[in-house]
Amino acid sequence: MYKLAKKITLFIILLGFFIFPTHILATTEDNFNPHNLISDEEMQNWQSMERADIQAFLVDKNSFLANYKTKDKEGITRTASDIIARAAREHQINPKYLLVKLQKEQSLITAKNPTEKQLNGATGYGISDGCGWTCTTYLNNIGFGKQIDAAAGIIRWYYENMSKEIWIKRPNISYIIDNQLIIPKNKATAFLYTYTPHIQGNKNFWKLWNDWFSQVYPDGSLLKAQTSANIYLIQDGKKRNIKNMSVLLSRFDIKMVIEVSDSELANYPDGIELNFPNYSILRQNSQYYLVDFDTIRPFENANTVKTLGYHPDEILDVNESDLAGYIIGQKITVDTTNFVGKLLRVKENNNLYYLKDNTLFPITDPDIAKVNFPNLIEEKINLKELTNYKIGELVKLKDGSIFGIENDNKIYVVENGKKRHIFDEQVFNAYGFKWTNIVWIDQLTGINIPTGQPLYLPSRMITKEINTLTKSDTTKINLTPEEESVYINNGFVTDINTYLVADYETEEILTGKNIDEIRPMASFTKVMTGYLLFKKGINIEGKNTYQADRHQSVYHNFRIVEGEQIYNKDLLNSMLVSSINTPAKMLVNYVEPDEKLFIKEMNKQAIDWGLNKTKFTDVSGYDLGNVTTAREYLKIFKNVSKNIDMKKYLGTKYYDYNEIKDLDNKPRHYDYNSNELMNKDGLPFNIITSKTGYLNEAGACLAMIIERKSDNKKFIIITMGNPDYKNRFAEPERLSLWTMEKL
């Protein structure tokens, strides 16, 4: 597939190192309709953003909240993005609504150093005109976590109780608000006026919503209306008409054009027309310019134009308005060399560069050169000639490029120099992307492209089927499109994204699916953490005292209070059997105060085992930077399970222990193994070791070493990316039973 994609891929012809400026789609007051602020579909599209999307949004905005951790409604310390994602999911309210609310009420998205008061009243819930910040409702919901939950929860409550409570505003009823007649056209608009009974406040909401979330197609997209021949470039959130075919062909690959509805194009304000082919010579009065994509480069004088070999017939006379929207670029003199660019290949080391204006821009993957410079033929250059030029930045894929990373299988689109993961095949097809336009780049190049927000379906593209999802439906994860899946000895059919069955003794992979796809590890991480703890000689009888500021992890879920003491051997049960995060930090800090050094040793161990696709970024697995493949995790899990201490803990079905020092009158801790199959009777196999893992982005994960009862043959089974969390052990059990029968 990779080779085929590479052969048939062509891309938009833009400079690879050019990055469009970040844009927030502008709205105008003329578009404001106070009767229709937001649709019910948008308000209830709770799947519009996952936790990772929310975090990426906060990072993109350079928000204080990107690094903010606080207690949620239950008193558990979590990241702001996690709190928002959980509230949205629980109440089935769009997380975008909550982000806009945070900005509208307390400017918390853009505030650099928000006050405690701003954070405590994050969404303005309970703060009314009558009593302000002293309202009882507010005081009962003070704090960021409670405010977020309340803001989402009250909207859901409005939907469920509108018919029961007359004071809740409803659609198609006339209201006088700020001396103006308002007739809400839908429930969501009515509820916004119920929450904030002022036009200006809701106008602010509307503007923020449209500024942040109305753009659908990424910058760099080429769109064509169904009813006209016009083609537009989406740039800075605006649609720029491409004047004619000459302009189009000089700058872009026509295969990248996406046909959309007239109504979709109407969502983008008009930008300045693209009216000249690339590298056109323009003359305004006595000043000459070279069109260089979105810049116009002034020639020093008319003689320079003549000296460089341009014919008078090539020169286009223009006026000042024709030059609107262009950036004035670097001046061209008679001494300027390579101002239209060359593609150079070094004879001695085969390195590839783009040369322009005496600067060499390195190209790490030849497929980027095919995309960015399809009309350039490589020229050979000697290594010693490189000293004649400056070295510039790496050539990057341009906005609008569709690409995949080899051995990853995920597909991305580039916007503002960042890679946006296209969530799944449905999203890919809904946007009108073409599989033949995918270019495959190497892993190093792909890793060096910063990560932006994943690309999901906006509500105006969502089908009725998606809109009818209920709270009980499985949350989507990042699945590999089936046509891109790679099977080994395909015999077991499953919706699980990645699985592997291997012979324990030989490590021969007997069957599998996407075993080399790099995926988040989730709590699979704890297996390496535990192994290294024993390798470093942890004293399992040692006493470990809980300190919240040092030990409390993301997804805390561990009933413990400041100053309580627990034996390390018991913390190991909580970490490896129950898969709780905080015990991992407590144990690691016991043997190594500098957690970063411990993580470095985890990565070194992976390298020592010959694993080049596995990476650890924290000790419990909550961070998405913990990644591996099924093939590499096979090696990890077997090696770790050979350790006698790890084998004992990973094979534990149930534990029960008391704290050494109890301060909350709740000393007892007990739990069954997080793998439900460990305690299931009647299976034709025994489970020797097991480890679970779960993040929304990783799906449900399960690793097991099982032994067939009939002949004592052992197998290693690994599943990753199981989309059905509610029934997350059903498919691994089915795979295991299939293995017992077929292998």
Image: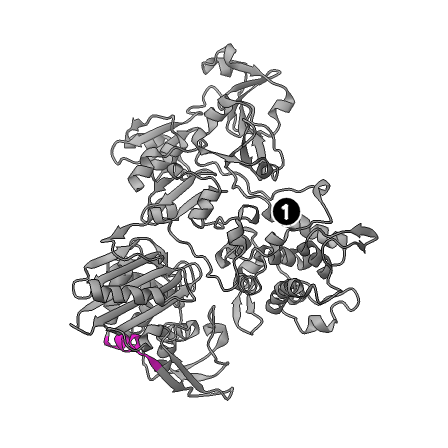
Q: Residue at x 23, y 76 (%)?
A: 644
Is residue 391 on the magenta stretch?
no
Q: Is residue 277 visible?
A: no
Residue 287: name its quadrant: top right
Looking at the image, which residue sits at the far right?
179
In the rendered structure, the answer to whether residue 13 lies left or right of residue 495 reads right
In the foreground, 166 or 479: 166
Q: Residue at x 29, y 53 (%)?
A: 516
Stretch in magenta: 644-654
The answer to whether residue 327 is above or below residue 708 is: above
The answer to whether residue 97 is above or below residue 740 is: above
Q: Is residue 370 visible?
A: yes
**x and y, in percent, of residue 102 in the image:** 63, 59
Q: Amino acid at mark 1?
A: Asn
**x and y, in percent, of residue 512 in the image:** 26, 56
The answer to whether residue 84 is above or below residue 648 is: above
Please identify the dominant SS of the magenta region. Answer: helix
**x and y, in percent, of residue 628 in the image:** 33, 58
Residue 570: name its quadrant: bottom left
In the rendered structure, the answer to whether residue 177 lies left or right of residue 466 reads right
In the rendered structure, the answer to whether residue 106 lies left or right of residue 611 reads right
The answer to whether residue 540 is above or below residue 119 is: below
**x and y, in percent, of residue 81 in the image:** 53, 61
Is residue 648 on the magenta stretch?
yes
Quadrant where the C terminus sits is bottom left
What residue sits right under mark 1 in the picture?
210
